[in-house]
Amino acid sequence: MHASDDTPLAPAWLEVPTDTGLLDHDVWPTTAERSAEGELMLGGVAASDLVAAHGSPLYVLDETAARGRASGILDAFRTAFDAIGANVDLHYASKALLTIDIAEWMAEAGLGLDVASGGELEVALAAGVAPATIGMHGNNKSRGELERAVGAGVGSIIVDSLSEIALLADVAEKAGRVQSVMVRINVGIHASTHDYLATSHEDQKFGLTREDAVKAVRRIRSAPSLELLGLHSHIGSSIYEPSGFGAAAERLMRLRAELLADGPIPEVNLGGGFGINYLPSDDAPDIADLARGIAAEVDRVCRETSTDMPRFVFEPGRSIIGPAGVTLYTVGTTKRVTVPGERGGTREYVAVDGGMSDNIRPALYGADYCVRVANRTSSAPATLVRVVGKHCESGDIVVNHDYLPDDVTAGDLLAVPATGAYCWSMASNYNYLERPAIVAVRDGVAREVVRRVTINDLLALDAGWNRKANQ
């Protein structure tokens, strides 16, 4: 039965579950399961044990899932591009979630790293990632960031504006290096995603128009301290419609064919942005099918333009780490609300000990998630819920619509899947809440990857607190 048959407050896509404890493995990590007692197990570790040892809220990463997705996506693209006689590499888009451990997992899986700030670069270097396998992004790289990147020997710097070229050329010249450069181009594909996640339409801050990209290529080729490595395109993030990727590939490859008249362009980077399943009703693109489709497009364009086959790079982030993450919360209060009117109904507000400080995506993008009780199962009937946080905002919503057992109560643990990407990375300490720790689980063992940011940590940053402590 669809939820709308039960209450007008529920969206049409939401089905009333026959089992409120069921884990859909299109959404949950590969090792997620229920114990004989009904408790959620992640990587062989019970949710209640994780919270007892590391606190709540808590980010949990299924290490097996993260490593497996990195290797699996790399294999899918290499298989697809081998079939057309092309080489391909993957760079993990570290903005999704970056720690030293994760950088090591990606390197061990054979991936390079895409960084977008000096801070991300420092984490990558601290993890021992080979600088030659790092690509440096950013629409407003500072001189200091460029000096660090060039000095460290990063494999490519992706130019995002005409004004950046002269600055980078000067930095590379003073360092006595010839820096490999890519040009980020807006190919004009309007990706079917939230406006804030679409990054290749004309009126936004990233990349260069086709006309300016041609100018950029000329300037780079004329700069002795720069070497043109290739062209870059990224149409957006969390995209479910695969046709956009093929269309972007065709446009970039045709531009490359024109620019080859004045010199080589050995590499084409087609970005990432592949969507994942946040809900059982989602239909994320199959990565192997997606890779084959893009490969077919570039193969066709190369044949039609009689051009050589470049090396390709892709930058998946969310599609690797997103499905590997689960956030655990503890229920505080519950409140049953009846909404009057023709479209009214009843829903349960379930408040947890986190919220928009650990997952801003629902407030920022209207992102949807699903939820399950983690510490037990229940035979109570399903009730429509909205899981909310404890912040001073009415938009502080963790899960907008889902069903939980009618007996959900204070002290229960809730688990929200598909939170590996952009949750910790975009977290804050709003209302002075502690920032949750990240724990990796694998083969029945849990280990802390990033420790919790405590109230004492926050007070230690306050000069007034330090002044008073020393009085």
Image (cartoon, helix red, strand yellow):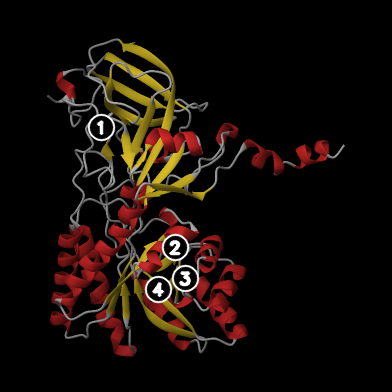
> Where is mark 3, residue-wise?
129
Q: Which residue is mark 4?
A: 183
Between 169 and 261, the residue placed more toward the observer is 169
How crowded pointer 1 is (Cα within 10 Å; few <14, some 14-19, many 20+) is rated as few
Residue that protrudes farthest toward the right in the picture: 471
Residues at badges 3 and 2 in contact (C-beta under 8 Å)? yes
Q: Quadrant of residue 330?
A: top left
- Mark 1–mark 2 Cα distance, whole angstroms, equals 35 Å
Mark 1 or 2, nearer chain start: 1
Q: CA distance from mark 3 to mark 1?
A: 41 Å
Q: Position of residue 161 (x, y in %)?
A: 47, 69
Which element type, helix, strand or loop, lies under badge 1? loop
Q: Which residue is denoted by mark 1 in the rendering?
A: 36
Q: Real-space Cα distance between discs 3 and 2?
A: 7 Å
Question: Mark 2: which amino acid?
Answer: Ala
Q: Residue at x 32, y 60 (%)?
A: 316
> What type is the residue that disc 1 sits on?
Ala
Can residue 349 be seen from the camera position used here? yes
Residue that carries the numbered disc 2 in the rendered image: 103
Q: Residues within 10 Å of mark 4 (few under 14, many from 20)?
A: many
In the rendered structure, which disc, 3 or 1, sits on the residue that comes first in sequence? 1
